[in-house]
Structure formats: C-alpha cells, structure tokens
Image (cartoon, rainbow, N blue to C red):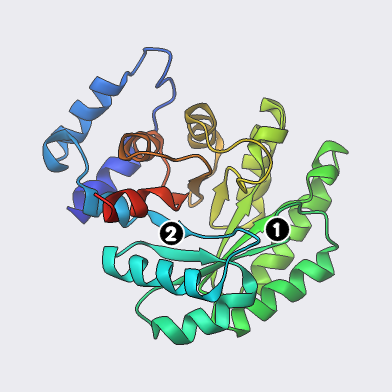
C-alpha cells in the first residue's frame, strides 16, 4: 500500500482537476492502475497523512491529551498543538506520535528573532515538526528576499526537523501564491502549507493544484483548514497534498 500510494503521489500532479481535463473519475481510475485500494485510498492510508490538530485559544491540557490519544490510536502523521503544550505532550506520548507545533501563529508578523527563538524553544521541548507563518506584509511589500531569508533562518533553527511554511492563501493573489512556491523551494523548507485556519478561509482544491504545478522538487504540500470529509481528504491527496491539517477526520471516524 505505501509503495503504491507513493507512486500515486508522484504521478498525480493534477493540473486541471476542476476544469475537466482530468476529472475526479479519471483520477480514481489512475489510482486503481497503481493498485491503491481499487482506485480509492482506504481510511487507514488517509489517516497517515493527517496532522491531527488542535490550535484553539481555549485548548486545555485534557483536550490536548485526548487528541494525542486519538492520534496514537488512529496512527496519524502527527499531532499539531500550541507551543505551550509541546513538552508535556512529548512526555505524554513517549515517542509514539510526532509532535508538531506552530511558530509566528497565526498572524506571522512577529520579528524574525522572535520566530527563531520560538522555533529553537519548540525543538528543545521535543517538537518533531514546525509549521511557521510567513510575514504576509513583507510579501505584499514585495520584500521577497526578506521572506526567503526568514524561512532559511527558521529552517536552520529547526536543527534537522521538518519545516512547513504557512502562506495563508486566502489573503494572497494568485501571483503571490506562485511567488511563494518559488521562495519556499529556494529557502529549503520541507512543505508549503495553505492556511492557518484563522483568517477566514482554508484550503481549496484550486490552491493545492496551483502548488503542485509550481513548487520545486523535494517540496511537499500541506492542505489545512476546512477539510470536513473523507471525500475532501482524498481529493486533496489526489491533487498532490501530502499532509492534511484537520481535526474533523479523526473525530468523524471516532464517532462513527
């Protein structure tokens, strides 16, 4: 299953998914050709791509423990939680689950030194993955070198851990999204990510398709915000996403 799904992710960079050039039915036939569960991913495979997420301001330790338990039970890719809970969560899961946290969240307009400190602190506390928010104002001001340099600095601060770069697609033009695909690639980050989920819009199929067309080799895609069903999850993965930031998928499966 893993090898088949890997082939599928490499080959299915679907450019015109919604335009009809390569429709959903055809993409499923392509999956079938690669032996992925008769053309569809099964639930277990989808869950391996999920960053099970709780980032609400009101999140309590009991709630964090609950999503950690669910992530371990359902074998998700990680739990994505606020920085203040990283150390506790790492001790709680005892290596059974990767702990992801967020930096410069959700606005992204802290100084680079603050973001760097946050990143180093999170890694020291046991974070395996870092999701940072870019300085969107710098992007709007066309300070592309500053945006790229900040990503480079945070990648170094990750000390070999995974870095995902949140660009907040709902606030950007198509030109800015394409520009960020190039910047994230040049800066050496591991993922480009659509959204925080805190700015009025989340992942869209069009944005993930756009990313798949424009990111460079070695850069993966994370879709986050508003992923509400297994059908949505499968479609995002078919379009080229490798990770899904969501809390709803696990809750839906847990609650039947």
User: As drawn, is 252 to the left or to the right of 228?
Assistant: left
User: As drawn, is 226 to the left or to the right of 28?
Assistant: right
At horizontal 54% and vertical 53% (from top left) the residue drawn is 191
Residue 130, percent across and down?
58, 65
**What is the crowding at mark 2: few (fewer than 14 residues within 10 Å), some, or many (at least 20)?**
many
Label total for image: 2
Above or below, 201 relative to 20: below
Q: Secondary structure at mark 1?
A: loop
Q: Find out whether the residues at labels 1 and 2 contact each other: C-beta distance under 8 Å.
A: no
Pointer 1 residue: 105
Q: Secondary structure at mark 2?
A: strand
User: As drawn, is 141 to the left or to the right of 54?
Assistant: right
Above or below, 4 relative to 99: above
Residue 129, percent across and down?
53, 68
Point out which mark residue 52 bears.
2
Residue 222, percent across and down?
49, 48
Q: Quadrant of residue 199?
A: top right
Would residue 229 be seen by someone viewing this image from the given angle? yes
**Extreme residue in the top direction:** 20
Label 1 vs label 2: CA separation? 17 Å
Q: Earlier in the sequence, mark 1 or mark 2?
A: 2
Would residue 159 be seen by someone viewing this image from the given angle? no
At horizontal 47% and vertical 87% (from top left) the residue drawn is 91
């Amino acid at each position: 299953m893993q090898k088949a799904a890997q082939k599928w992710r490499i080959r299915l960079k679907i450019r015109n998914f919604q335009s009809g050039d390569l429709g959903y039915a055809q993409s499923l036939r392509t999956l079938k050709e690669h032996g992925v569960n008769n053309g569809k991913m099964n639930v277990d495979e989808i869950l391996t791509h999920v960053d099970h997420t709780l980032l609400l301001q009101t999140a309590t330790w009991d709630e964090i423990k609950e999503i950690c338990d669910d992530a371990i039970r359902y074998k998700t890719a990680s739990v994505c939680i606020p920085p203040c809970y990283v150390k506790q969560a790492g001790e709680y899961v005892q290596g059974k689950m990767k702990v992801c946290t967020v930096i410069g969240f959700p606005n992204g307009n802290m100084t680079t030194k603050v973001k760097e400190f946050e990143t180093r602190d999170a890694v020291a506390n046991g974070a395996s993955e870092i999701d940072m928010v870019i300085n969107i104002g710098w992007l709007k001001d066309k300070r592309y070198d500053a945006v790229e340099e900040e990503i480079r600095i945070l990648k170094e601060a990750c000390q070999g851990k995974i870095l995902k770069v949140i660009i907040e697609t709902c606030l950007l033009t198509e030109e800015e999204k394409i520009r960020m695909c190039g910047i994230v690639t040049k800066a050496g980050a591991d993922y480009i990510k659509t959204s925080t989920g805190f700015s009025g819009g989340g992942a869209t199929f069009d944005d993930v398709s756009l990313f798949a067309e424009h990111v460079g080799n070695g850069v993966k895609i994370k879709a986050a915000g508003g992923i509400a069903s297994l059908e949505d999850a499968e479609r995002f993965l078919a379009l080229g996403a490798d990770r899904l930031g969501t809390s709803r998928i696990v809750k839906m499966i847990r609650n039947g």
